[in-house]
Image (tube, grey):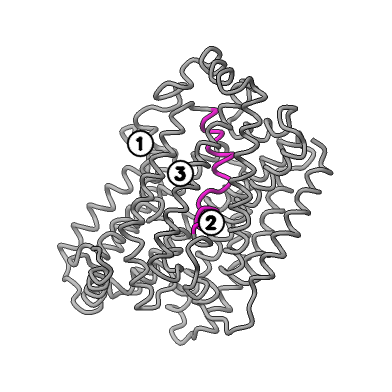
Amino acid sequence: MTPGWIWFGVAIYVVIAGTAALMSRHDGEQTMSSYFLGNRRMGGFMSAMSYSATTYSAFMLIGLAGLTYTGGVGALGFELIYLCGVTLVLIFGPRFWLAGKKFGYVTPSEMLGDRYENRAVGVVAALCSLVFLIPYAAVQLAGVGYLLSGMTDGEISFTSGTVLVTVLAIGFSMVAGLRSVVWTDTLQAVFMIITATLVVILVVHELGGVSGFFNSLTNEHPGALSVPGKGFFSFSTFLGLTLPWVFFSLSNPQVSQRLFTPKTMKDMRRMLLGFMIFGFIYTLVAVTWGFAAMVKFPDLATGDLATPTLLASSVVPTALAIIVMIGIIAAAVSTIDSIMLTLSSMATRDVYSVVKKDAGDTEQLLVGKVMLPVIALMAYLFAQLELNLIAVLSVSASAGLLVLVPALVGAFFWRRGTAAGAIASILVAGAVVFYLEFAKVKFLGQGSGVWGLTLSVVLFVGVSLATPQPTGRAQEFMDHVRTKLADHGAI
């Protein structure tokens, strides 16, 4: 495909998404809460679409499709387990929302610092998120880099694609904070699901219809449709990939921060239901896309080229290929926007405010805005490493965030949990995960997430039992959440 068509599609996307972002602006007073949480007044439908666009990023039509191309049907099981893990929002969503509404939390790490009566907990959680979310943000940039380079056979470079998304992400997030991101997310999510579904139906038709498509998979790619797949997935590989995904909705702060934003509890329920429907459809679309590339182009160098190669082929008309390309770019921009907003709010609320104790809300907001392009630049530099297999890199980043799970669970369900236990579980286990990922070591054949979560649980429980139980804010926090949940008819 010629670069001219690519840039034409990008220009259309920028005009439409930019207009939506500008329309989201309002002239009221800007605070940390309004800029980073949309004043906690997001409706159910927009929350659902934004949650979906934030979660389903370049990982899906490039990463999950590539994983399907490489590993076969095991990729479907891997992603469906993630959807099952989202049911954790049923348990933790109302608790996050009630705590945030009562105590005014802006970030999940701020909540942890307050619950454990030690701001150092928030600092440690924020720094852990920064270390492991920068690679995940870089995945979004790399996804578009591979997409544009693959669709034009290298005429648009990988670097050009990453620069494009970096600039767009900074622009959209700076316009009006979360409000502009939610507006553009809603537009992008609806566009993503409709266009991707229609195009994958067309592709299957072009490859012989449903029966011909599955006959080709069965006859030409034996093992692709049988568990565990084509040999890529072993039990340890599957466990290492899926464990971070099960807890993704809780461990990834750019997602859990969204639990502070719905206007009412009813809006939160609508958000979850809408996301589950969106996620199921999009998962089937992405997996089918990977299988289609397997049938049409069985000898690609890497699975990450599956989607770009398919879009650039004669199977997909140029106009439709551009539409899908715009959807993938939109998904990547949405996710990196959310990561930028979350990390900048953490850097300000949980780190800067500790260093400068007299920093007011206005000063914090200014610092948070300054941090947005800094975080985007860090992600851009990491993306230039061009690490392959986007799906695996995404999970590796999330594996490090698993170490936050015990402290988060303990915040709501274990009064005996202490600040020392939370800090030890995050610092030590996080360092172990970082080493295992950096050194590419699989201890006893298991992935870093398995050992990170196990060690984090042991440290959190053991150190908490060995240190004095908190009795002040911690008890107020837990009693308030429990009482309000009872008032809503659920505990």
Q: Whole-percent x and y of residue 94? A: 34, 65
Query: Is tag 3's residue or tag 2's residue first in the polypeptide sequence?
Result: 2
The front one of 367 and 5 is: 5
The N terminus - image quarter: top right
Q: Whole-percent x and y of residue 438? A: 46, 44
Q: Say how many tags the image has.
A: 3
Query: For residue 235, which quarter of the picture?
Result: top left
> Height in image: 251 above or below 227?
below
Mark 3: amino acid: Val
Q: Secondary structure at mark 3?
A: helix
> Image point 39% across, 60% down: which residue?
269
> Image point 57% across, 23% down: which residue?
210
Distance from disc 2 to disc 1, alpha carbons, whole Å, reads 29 Å
Tell me the number on the disc at residue 239. 1
Q: Secondary structure at mark 1?
A: helix
> Which secondary structure is most common in the magenta stretch?
helix
Asked if labels 2 and 3 touch by Cβ distance under 8 angstroms, the answer is no
- Label 2: which residue? 49
Q: Whole-percent x and y of residue 214? A: 53, 20
Left or right of 186? Residue 106 is left
Mark 3 or 2: in front is: 2
Alpha-carbon neighbours of circle 2 within 10 Å: few (<14), some, or many (≥20)?
A: many
The front one of 350 and 74 is: 74
Tell me the number on the disc at residue 395. 3
The C terminus - image quarter: bottom left
